[in-house]
Amino acid sequence: MENHALKSWPDVAPKLVAVAAGRAPADTVLKGGAWVNVHTREVLENHDIAIAEGRFAYCGPDASHCIGPDTQVIDCAGQYMIPGLCDAHMHIESGMLTPAEFARAVAPHGTTSMFTDPHEIANVMGLEGVRLMHDEALLQPINIFTQMPSCAPSAPGLETTGFEITPDDVAEAMTWPGIIGLGEMMNFPGVVNADPKMLAEIAATQRAGKAVGGHYASPDLGPAFHAYAAGGPADDHEGTCEADAIARTRQGMRHMMRLGSAWYDVETQITAVTEKGLDPRNFILCTDDCHSGTLVNDGHMNRVVRHAIECGCDPLIALQMATINTATHFGLERELGSISPGRRADVILTSDLGTLPIHRVIARGVTVAIEGEMKVDCPHLDWPAHARDTVHMGRALSGADFEIAAPAGANHVTANVIGVVENQAPTKALKAELKVQDGLVPGDPEQDVCQIALVERHQATGGVVNAFVSGFGYTGQMAMASTVAHDSHHMIVVGTSHADMALAANRLQEVGGGVTIWKDGKELALVELPIAGLMSDAPATEVAAKADKMVQAMEACGCTLNNAYMQHSLLALVVIPELRISDLGLVDVRTFELTPLFDEGQDQ
């Protein structure tokens, strides 16, 4: 499948030259706008842009010589012409949407290029799932490039996934037309320790001349960090503070700063540019994870650029971080990321560079959205039936499956508890003194400790691993279950009631995956995600409406965290410190080892 409605530069170069010279008419001319040039960081008033064959042909003070009788002329007086925005690192599945519906949701916000890592579906469906995402991406009217997932499982030996990705899989994917590089190398201990499999994947990518995505989720900037940098990752997005940003760029990495639905890592890192004065061309903006509610209600990359500006970044520098910097990083500077001759004609018309209202979006020379309304179709792939049948628990669960037995003879225990951190991916490894009741250890609402369970859903083993989590603030009798559980995507159930936890888990098996919330034996909200238990092919507005009800239901159960759903979905992410849950038990990500639920030597 070729990029839809787009010819390569060699195929159209004669036409572009002819248009620029005035020997042939342009398809479209943007007349009299302020050209935002991200190569020179200038705003050039009263300029014209001529487009032909989906690419820019002429960018200069007067394109009158490019206008023929059939040329569409768009009056841009009073508007800025800026390059289409690029999301340098993101996961489509986090939007709960298929690539087609994600494209339909973000194009009106000015996103015309995305660099996506479908490692969520890779954990559920393996290489086939990646290929399905890749193929639907190539059908879209905007540019969706796919990174081949690198780590499934993300931490070998600490979790079991539906499928494993091998170096041979990576080498095969590098031959696909839409593959732009290797997805984030989450197994950073593997790279640090020169694991042959991880280095083989990186080598296959570099032999193909493509970028290796990074993921160094540790605050340790000592020898381990330097070993990771030596291992080949070309970028990283896991930094959370200014020191992280400085360290990565000094090592030759492009540093990606993310603003997702729950990740607010721009403000704490952009000071490396705004205050320390580091070269901004080595900094990139991205979202990483945005759910459908954020996309529909708040925006996408336009939201990130606005936020960077609010944090003190010069608007033109912020735009560079979301356009040309990204294109350069992926080796596409001659293809996109700027309004320049030969590049894909991806351009946004906006009336204000600070607040960035998106009036018109042109992708590959075609107007795809005007004032927030999509004007073209986003074609769907025909997903196979087995992609909608991926929740295999093996049996129906009961409340007894969620009981946690106390050590023999104990009347209280010291439990290791996963501590949720608002607006950040890392968790805390907490301790809690919990009482024993009738031989069982329940949670303690007064300490904000409730239960968490991981339900195996790939191999129908019937397995349930139980532990404790703090930070959600849940009260009363409730449960929340989700088959979105980065990265293994088993089922995560959090609750205060064993009976409700069983009801929630069984409900997701019934509907083929998604998110459900129960209170006092009744379902308050359900978001069906039938494709791989991760995505819906319904329109984003419909999914967002159900997601809004989900948020309201969480609040009705006592949760006041910002974007608590995203925190819920990351509780099994065994590559980000400090404490996580997997199908093999409780994982201490500081040491990459399994750790017991209870400390030894409990008082009897």
Image: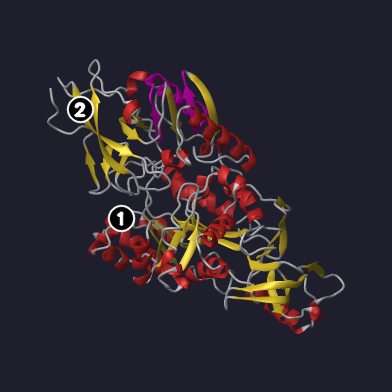
Q: Residues within 10 Å of mark 2 (few under 14, many from 20)?
A: many
Q: Are marks 2 and 1 in contact (CB under 8 Å)?
A: no
As shown in the figure, which amino acid type bears the numbered disc 2? Val
Q: Nearer the viewer, residue 523 or 532?
A: 523
Q: Nearer the viewer, residue 449 or 101?
A: 449
Q: Is residue 52 magenta?
A: no
Can the viewer see residue 24? Answer: no
Tell me where residue 516 appears, x and y as whole percent. Answer: 49, 29
Please tell me whether residue 548 is drawn above or below residue 174 in the rendered image: above
What residue is pinned by disc 2? 413
Please tell me whether residue 359 is drawn above or below residue 601 in the rendered image: below
Q: Which residues are magenta?
A: 491-520
Q: Residue at x 14, y 33 (%)?
A: 600
Left or right: 15, with 208 as reference point: right
Q: Residue at x 43, y 73 (%)?
A: 277
As shown in the figure, which amino acid type bears the numbered disc 1? Ser
Which of marks 1 and 2 precedes in the sequence?
1
Q: Is residue 495 magenta?
A: yes
Q: Residues within 10 Å of mark 1 (few under 14, many from 20)?
A: many
Q: Residue at x 37, y 64 (%)?
A: 233
CA gap, disc 2 to disc 1? 30 Å
Q: Quadrant of the C terminus?
A: top left
